[in-house]
Structures are given as C-alpha cells and as structure tokens.
Image (spheres, helix red, strand yellow):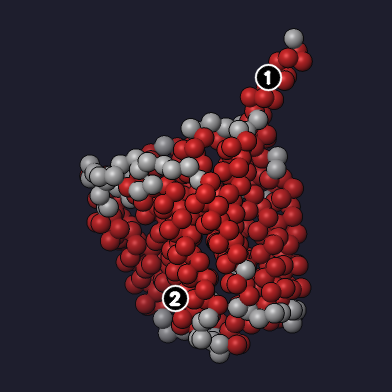
C-alpha cells in the first residue's frame, strides 16, 4: 500500500510531457531577451571606446533597455487579454529580433541606444507573456514546478551572460547581439509550429490610455532622475524629474482607485499583504543580484585592467550558487512553505 501511494504521488507530481515540451519551446524564445539583460555589461567599456562614447552616455545601453522594459511590462497584461497569447509572443519575439539586427549594424552610439530601446520593449512583453501562456496551458496546475522551470534562465544567465559576453567581445562587440538571432529564429519557428492556438480572453478590452500616459512618463522621469542625480550640473534637473515621477505615480494611484474600468495596473492588489511583500522582495532581490552586474565589470576592467572575459569569469560564481539551489527551490517551497524558504534565503544573502 505504501509503495502504491508513493508511486501515485510521484505520478501526480510529474509534469505533463506536452506541458514540458511547451515550456522548453518558451524557454528558447525567452533565452535571448534574458541573456541580453546581462551580456552587454562586460562589453560596456569596449563599446564606449569603439564608438567614442563616455560612461555617462554608454550607461544608457543598460538604462534604456531597463526603461523600455518597464514601460512595456504593464502593456503585456492588456495584450494577452486583447489578443491571442501565441500571437503576442511571436510578434514580440520578432520585434526583439529586429532590435538585435539593428544593434549589430549600428554605426554609432545613438543608433545602438535606439536598438536597445526596441529590444527592451520587446523583452518587457516576452517575459510576462511566456508565463501567461504556460499558466493558461497548464490550467494553473503545478505552478511551483512550472515557475521553477521557467526560472532556469534566471539561474543560468548570471553564469553565461558575463562569461559568454566576455568571450564574444574578443570577436567584436557586435557578436553579443549576433548571438540573439539564432535563438529568436528557432524560438519563432518552434512557436509557430508547437504553441497551441489560444483565444483572446477579452477582445473588447480597451487600452487604458490614461493609465499609460501616467505610468510611462512617471517611470521615465524616475529613471532619468536617478541617472542624472550624480551628473555634474544636473542635480536640480534630477530632483525635478524625481518629483515629477512621484507626482505622476501618485496621480495614477488616485485615478486607479476611483476608476471602474480595466486598468494597466490594478493597485488594489497591493492591499493583499502577501502580494505587496512579494513585490518588495522581488525588488530587493533584483538590486542584490543584478544591480552589481553593471558596475563590477567596469570596476574589474578599468581599475584592475582585466580583459572582458576574465571580468566575466569572476562574476560567474554568483550564478553558480544560484544554479545549485534553483533546482531544489520548488521542492523546498512545497515542503517547508514559501515563507520559510524566503526567510532563510534572505538570511543567507
């Protein structure tokens, strides 16, 4: 009886092979956008020298990417409801590919920054859409295992990003964008063939233009303000932008609380304690794990005169540590509860 119960439990916990295949296909598509968030960091110094751009300008290769992602993420929810999840995924992946090609052929820093904006806009839609498609396909079953599986790039990329980026810079910085193209092409073709057709949830849902006009400029103002705060002669401008960003976000909160229509971001969700705490933890986690991935390569290359490849290798151990525990995260969460796992993780960090 005990053996039968164990077998039944294992069978119950086992993911559907079709679902696993879908998850693998989606991972191929999201790999390039996820990799692009870190692979550029070790090439910053080389790109700046080749395109004759100072650090204050070259940092926008990262800032513009993150800024565009932040603008696009709120749109992903509306797009996934208004259109087919499959169509949105394929379209955003294609746009990311266009941005990658433009980055490869960029003749100057200005065009390269525009290419990064295009990539960021697409990445900000690809990443949430991947989760949406997989959750809808699974019917909400076995979410811890599915989320852990989708999180594999998060664990692997801190290893691959800096090391692969450091190696590719030796061939020419353009290669850090060339590497995206095969993943985009394969992911796009597999998506056409294997991702099941999905009906739109609400074809009549209208875009929340008021919310978009408040959130996007607000987010831009905050990012620009933070970027300018240490720039000589721009402190007043930075403070003004930060105030403008805060005012715009506050205005959106008031608008969202009073509105009865579908919103880009439903602020009422923050009244749920677990949701609010989770968002705060994700924010802090992002700072702890990725915030250093921009400054450390510059530190190693400028102050210690290391090559991009060596600088990338020094960053790899952080990713190795993440990979070692990532595979067990779903089991720990199901056995010990998410709260206990998070508390222990915070203490270890």
Residue 186 rendering spot, x and y as whole percentages: 58, 58
Q: Tell me if 316 is positioned left or right of 262 in this view.
A: right
Q: Tell whether label 2 touches label 1 (CB within 8 Å).
A: no
Vertical relation: 303 (above or below) 35: below
Residue nearest the observer in this picture, 132 or 37: 132
Q: Position of residue 126 (x, y in %)?
A: 48, 55
Badge 1: few (under 14), some or many (20 or more) residues near its Cα, within 10 Å?
few
Q: Give x and y (percent) for residue 5.
A: 71, 15
Find numbered disc 2 in the image and state the secondary structure of the residue it sits on. Answer: helix
Mark 1 = which residue? Answer: 8
Residue 302 placement: quadrant: bottom right
Query: SS at mark 1?
Result: helix
* Residue at 72% across, 73% down: 167
Q: Would residue 339 be visible to someone looking at this image?
A: no
In this view, the residue in front, 93 or 330, is 93
Label 1 – label 2 distance at C-alpha = 54 Å
Q: Which dot marks residue 79?
A: none
Kindly indicate the quadrant of the structure image that contains residue 38. bottom right
Identified at 52% across, 35% down, the residue is 138
Residue 120, relative to residue 167: is it above or below?
Answer: above
The answer to whether residue 28 is seen in the rendering is yes
Residue furthest out toward the top: 1
Measured as percent of width and height from the top left, residue 246 is found at 34, 61
Q: Which residue is mark 2?
A: 114
Q: Nearer the viewer, mark 1 or mark 2?
A: 1
Quadrant in the picture for the N terminus: top right
Picture residue at 61% right of the left edge, 87% below the top? 49
Q: Earlier in the sequence, mark 1 or mark 2?
A: 1
For image coordinates 66% across by 81% down, the residue present is 172
């Amino acid at each position: 009886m005990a053996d039968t119960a164990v077998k039944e439990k294992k069978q119950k916990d086992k993911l559907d092979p079709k679902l696993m295949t879908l998850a693998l296909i989606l991972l191929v598509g999201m790999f390039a956008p996820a990799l692009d968030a870190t692979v550029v960091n070790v090439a910053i110094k080389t790109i700046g020298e080749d395109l004759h751009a100072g650090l204050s300008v070259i940092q926008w290769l990262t800032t513009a990417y993150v800024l565009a992602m932040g603008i696009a993420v709120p749109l992903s929810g509306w797009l996934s409801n208004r259109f087919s999840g499959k169509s949105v995924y394929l379209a955003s992946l294609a746009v990311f590919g266009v941005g990658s090609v433009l980055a490869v052929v960029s003749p100057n820093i200005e065009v390269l920054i525009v290419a990064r904006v295009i990539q960021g806009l697409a990445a900000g839609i690809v990443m949430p859409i991947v989760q949406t498609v997989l959750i809808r396909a699974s019917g909400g079953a076995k979410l811890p295992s599915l989320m852990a599986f989708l999180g594999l790039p998060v664990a692997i990329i801190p290893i691959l990003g800096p090391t692969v980026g450091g190696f590719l810079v030796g061939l020419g910085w353009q290669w850090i964008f060339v590497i995206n193209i095969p993943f985009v092409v394969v992911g796009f073709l597999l998506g056409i063939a294997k991702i099941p057709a999905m009906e739109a949830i609400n074809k009549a849902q209208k875009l929340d233009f008021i919310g978009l006009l408040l959130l996007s400029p607000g987010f831009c103002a905050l990012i620009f303000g933070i970027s300018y705060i240490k720039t000589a002669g721009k402190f007043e401008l930075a403070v003004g932008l930060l105030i403008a960003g805060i005012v715009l976000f506050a205005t959106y909160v008031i608008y969202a609380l009073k509105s009865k229509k579908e919103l880009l971001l439903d602020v009422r969700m923050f009244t749920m304690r677990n949701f609010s705490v989770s968002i705060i933890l994700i924010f802090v986690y992002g700072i702890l794990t990725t915030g250093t991935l921009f400054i450390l390569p510059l530190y190693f290359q400028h102050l210690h005169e290391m090559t991009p490849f060596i600088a990338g290798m020094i960053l790899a151990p952080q990713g190795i540590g993440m990979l070692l525990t990532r595979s067990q995260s779903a089991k720990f969460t199901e056995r010990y509860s998410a709260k206990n796992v998070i508390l222990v993780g915070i203490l270890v960090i």
